[in-house]
Amino acid sequence: MKKIIILAALILTGCARQSLRTVCTCEQQERVAEFVSDNIAASNNMSDEEMEDVISQLAKTGATAFCDQRLFWYNSFPSDGIDWSRQKLDSCEALQ
């Protein structure tokens, strides 16, 4: 019986993986917002391209430039989501 419990525990812990995600603090989020507003005029090429795409790309670029990268644990089973029991975010941190 002990072997079955140990085997089940190994299988369940083996179903988790880690992945890098971008995390921004409140100050970093403000810097990203400033980056977007400072660069939006230069990014508008006056074409038919949707500005929503330009804004989201500027936000991604700003987050990459100003925010931190952290390893997060993901559950592969049952939901394939972030395992929030293994890591916590501060109240002023946002996952990008």
Image (cartoon, grey):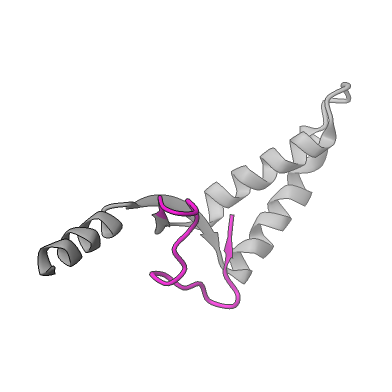
Magenta stretch, overall SS: loop
Q: In the image as oriented, which residue stretches furthest toward the top?
A: 47
Q: Position of residue 66 (x, y in %)?
A: 55, 55
User: Residue at 88% of width from left, 22% of height from top?
Assistant: 48
Q: Is residue 18 magenta?
A: no
Q: Is residue 84 magenta?
A: yes
Magenta residues? 75-96
User: Residue at 68% of width from left, 38% of height from top?
Assistant: 57
The answer to which of 47 and 52 lies nearer the viewer is 52
Q: Is residue 29 above or below residue 15?
A: below
Q: Is residue 20 left or right of residue 8?
A: right
Q: Is residue 35 above or below residue 49?
A: below
Q: Is residue 53 above or below residue 93?
A: above
User: Residue at 72% of width from left, 56% of height from top?
Assistant: 34
Query: The N terminus appears in which quarter of the rendering?
Result: bottom left
Q: Position of residue 55 (x, y in %)?
A: 76, 42
Q: Is residue 11 left or right of residue 25?
A: left
Residue 9 in which image quadrant: bottom left
Q: Is residue 64 left or right of residue 16?
A: right
User: Residue at 53% of width from left, 76% of height from top?
Assistant: 90
Query: The C terminus appears in which quarter of the rendering?
Result: bottom right
Q: Is residue 58 left or right of residue 52?
A: left
